[in-house]
Image: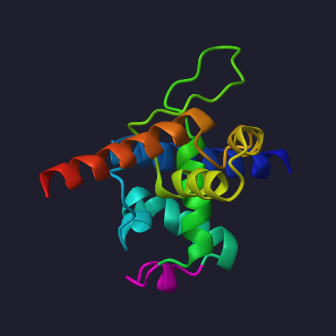
């Protein structure tokens, strides 16, 4: 039984290495002030979307290899995994550092939505601590950037 567990652990480790490599290769994706219709699909590697879909729907390779758009649940989970994936973590650290160079649409959207609905820092920080949203400070920074770009556009017009 332990030999089987060891083989499974090796297979899972190989899959994790592939996914982590693809996430790190995905590169930077900074928020530009708008959510395009394909921003979710483009923000995560295809290998991760495929793995998440296989976990949710079962390992049906025929359906996974087709070019059908991934369901929202797959895109949501894949973005949260990417958002919380760290390239390097300091030894002994439990905190996750999120860089603005690798922000994904979902955590930004959740932070902005929660801020628009509640205006409460404590709620946004709780959701941020769960790894589901950008921080309150980042929400304020994005709001300021959007406001400044609207003012710039107004002045140009």
Name the foreground residue: 5 vs 148: 148
Residue 14, image x and y in percent? Answer: 54, 46
- Residue at (28%, 48%) from the top-left corner? 151
Residue 110, image quadrant: bottom right
Residue 61, image x and y in percent? Answer: 51, 79
**Image height of 128 relative to 8, above or below:** above
What span is in magenta?
60-69
Q: Indicate yes or no whether the magenta region holds residue 39.
A: no
Name the foreground residue: 95 vs 26: 95
Q: Is residue 9 left or right of residue 80?
A: right
Residue 43, image x and y in percent? Answer: 41, 57
Q: Is residue 52 left or right of residue 32?
A: right
Looking at the picture, the colour scheme in use is rainbow
**Residue 14 appears in the picture as rendered:** no
Q: Quadrant of the C terminus?
A: bottom left
**Image height of 46 relative to 102, above or below:** below
- Number of disc labels: 0
Our reading of the magenta stretch's main secondary structure is loop
- Residue at (58%, 42%) from the top-left corner? 134
Residue 5, image x and y in percent? Answer: 78, 49
Name the foreground residue: 139 vs 99: 139
> Which residue is most to the top?
91
- Residue at (86%, 51%) from the top-left corner? 1
């Amino acid at each position: 039984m332990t030999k089987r567990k060891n083989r499974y652990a090796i297979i899972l480790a190989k899959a994790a290495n592939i996914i982590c490599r693809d996430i790190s290769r995905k590169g930077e994706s900074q928020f530009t002030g708008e959510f395009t219709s394909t921003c979710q699909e483009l923000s995560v590697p295809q290998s991760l979307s495929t793995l998440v879909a296989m976990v949710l729907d079962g390992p049906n390779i025929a359906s996974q290899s087709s070019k059908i758009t991934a369901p929202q649940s797959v895109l949501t989970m894949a973005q949260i995994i990417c958002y919380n994936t760290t390239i390097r973590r300091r030894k002994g650290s439990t905190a996750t550092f999120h860089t603005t160079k690798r922000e994904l649409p979902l955590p930004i959207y959740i932070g902005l939505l929660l801020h628009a609905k509640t205006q409460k820092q404590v709620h946004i920080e709780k959701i941020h601590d769960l790894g589901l949203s950008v921080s309150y400070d980042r929400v304020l920074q994005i709001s300021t950037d959007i406001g400044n770009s609207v003012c710039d556009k107004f002045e140009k017009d």
